Amino acid sequence: MGYCHVATPIYLTAGDVEAATVNMELISDGYNGDVIGEATPDFLLEEFMKGEKQLIERLLQTEIAMIQSIRSGSALMQHMEDFYYISLLQSARQRLPKLQISQAKAEIDGVRN
């Protein structure tokens, strides 16, 4: 793997552990190191991969939920403080009649022309 965090590197290799430890000199990097063979049982690897798939699925579902909350507007509601939302709602309600009146006037002016 090429990592050398200590004076003597440890090399990982696939294969039989007993046969791998016979040859202590590896590559031409000037180091003598221990060789650790692949000794992970297949069932552990399968469990690890199943956990990875579950993690990816949870992340995907979280992202989908986030995008849906942004599209629906609920993300904004969740982000706002209660009093900020209440004051925004009151302000919108106060301005709504004025907006409706100005739209009605514009429609009337459009009919007159």
Image: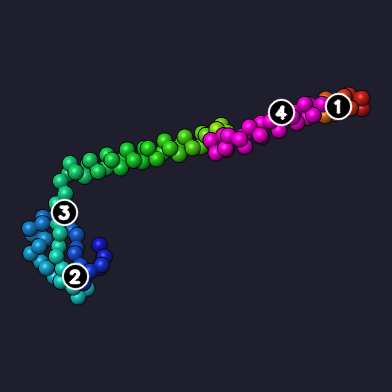
Q: Residue at x 71, y 28 (%)?
A: 93
Alpha-carbon span between mark 1 and mark 3 = 81 Å
Q: Identify residue type, mark 1.
A: Lys
Badge 2 crowding class, 10 Å Cα cut-off, few under 14, some 14 to 19, many 20 or more, is: few
Task: Assess whether mark 3 and mark 1 are in contact (beta carbons under 8 angstroms).
Answer: no
Alpha-carbon span between mark 1 and mark 2 = 85 Å
Alpha-carbon span between mark 3 and mark 4 = 69 Å
In this rendering, would 101 be left or right of 52?
right
State which tag comes first along the sequence, 1 or 4.
Answer: 4
Q: Position of residue 62 (x, y in %)?
A: 43, 37
Alpha-carbon span between mark 2 and mark 3 = 19 Å
Alpha-carbon span between mark 2 and mark 4 = 73 Å
In this rendering, the label closer to the viewer, 1 or 3: 1
Q: Residue at x 14, y 51 (%)?
A: 39
In this rendering, the label closer to the viewer, 2 or 4: 4
Q: Which residue is mark 1?
A: 105
Determine the secondary structure under disc 3: loop
Q: Residue at x 25, y 43 (%)?
A: 48
Please identify the dominant SS of the magenta region.
Answer: helix
| 39 lies above or below 22 | above
In this rendering, would 64 be left or right of 33?
right
- Residue furthest out toward the front: 83
State which tag comes first along the sequence, 3 or 4.
Answer: 3
Alpha-carbon span between mark 1 and mark 4 = 19 Å
Q: Which residue is mark 4?
A: 93
Q: Which residue is mark 2?
A: 8
* Label ID, residue 32: none
* Label ID, residue 38: 3
Badge 1 crowding class, 10 Å Cα cut-off, few under 14, some 14 to 19, many 20 or more, is: few
State which tag comes first along the sequence, 2 or 3.
Answer: 2
Q: Residue at x 66, y 34 (%)?
A: 87
